[in-house]
Image: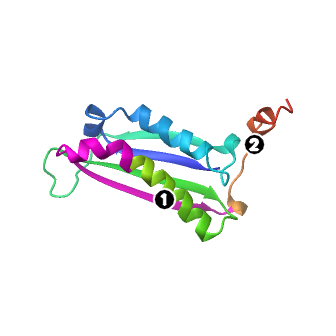
């Protein structure tokens, strides 16, 4: 963990290069000591059918869901959220200042360790063990 999930409206992908946002978020996550590099997963999902606000065309959204394993205190989780939200707001700043109508959000979800199963050899590889 963590998983950084970028959910976005189809229309915003016409104005913003979402793959760059994925890269920016992933790089920022790698830079946080609270997150193990080998566990970071960043992905984007485009939503084709959606309505935002009053439902008029041109209202778009980007919503980040950060899924973390248990064990981090609230201050650490808040720091992770604030760091990644700053990446998102910086990435969209010009679009919003230029009049683009865009709703941004971020939520952190904690995954119950008793109800998740994982197998990962990336950690060992990054440590030079394999």
Q: Residue sitting at 46 percent across and 60 percent down?
A: 107
Q: Is residue 109 magenta?
A: yes
Vertical relation: 77 (above or below) 35: below
Q: Quadrant of the C terminus?
A: top right
The one nearer the camera, 23 or 90, is 90
Residue extending farthest top: 130
Asked where in the image residue 104 lies, by quadrant, the reply is bottom left
The image quarter in which residue 48 lies: top left
* SS at circle 1: helix
Q: Position of residue 32 (x, y in %)?
A: 62, 50
**For this rendering, which residue is in front, 96 or 62?**
96
The answer to whether mark 1 and mark 2 are in CB contact below 8 A is: no
**Residue 56 placement, left or right of 77:** left
Q: How is the image coloured?
A: rainbow
Q: Which residues are magenta?
A: 89-112
> x, y percentage for residue 55?
16, 53
Q: Label 1 vs label 2: CA separation?
A: 29 Å
In-front residue for pair 61/50 = 61
Q: Which residue is mark 1?
A: 82
Look at 71% across and 51% down and name the residue there.
Answer: 117
Residue of label 2: 119
Residue ranking furthest to the bottom: 74
Q: Which mark is residue 35?
A: none
Q: Is residue 64 visible?
A: no
Looking at the picture, does residue 117 appear above or below residue 42? below
Could you tell me which secondary element the residue under label 2 belongs to? loop
Q: Residue at x 49, y 51 (%)?
A: 84
Q: Position of residue 37 (x, y in %)?
A: 67, 42
Q: Is residue 106 magenta?
A: yes
The 10 Å Cα crowd at callout 1, few under 14, some 14 to 19, many 20 or more, is few
């Amino acid at each position: 963990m963590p998983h950084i999930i970028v959910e976005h409206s189809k229309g915003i992908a016409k104005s913003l290069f979402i793959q760059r946002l994925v890269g920016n978020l992933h790089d920022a996550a790698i830079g946080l000591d609270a997150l193990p590099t080998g566990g970071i997963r960043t992905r984007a999902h485009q939503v084709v059918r959606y309505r935002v606000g009053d439902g008029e065309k041109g209202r778009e959204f980007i919503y980040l869901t950060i899924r973390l394993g248990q064990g981090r205190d609230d201050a650490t989780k808040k720091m992770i959220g604030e760091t990644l939200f700053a990446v998102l707001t910086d990435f969209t700043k010009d679009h919003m200042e230029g009049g683009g109508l865009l709703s941004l959000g971020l939520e952190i979800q904690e995954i119950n360790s008793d109800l998740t199963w994982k197998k990962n050899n990336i950690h060992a590889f990054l440590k030079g063990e394999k």
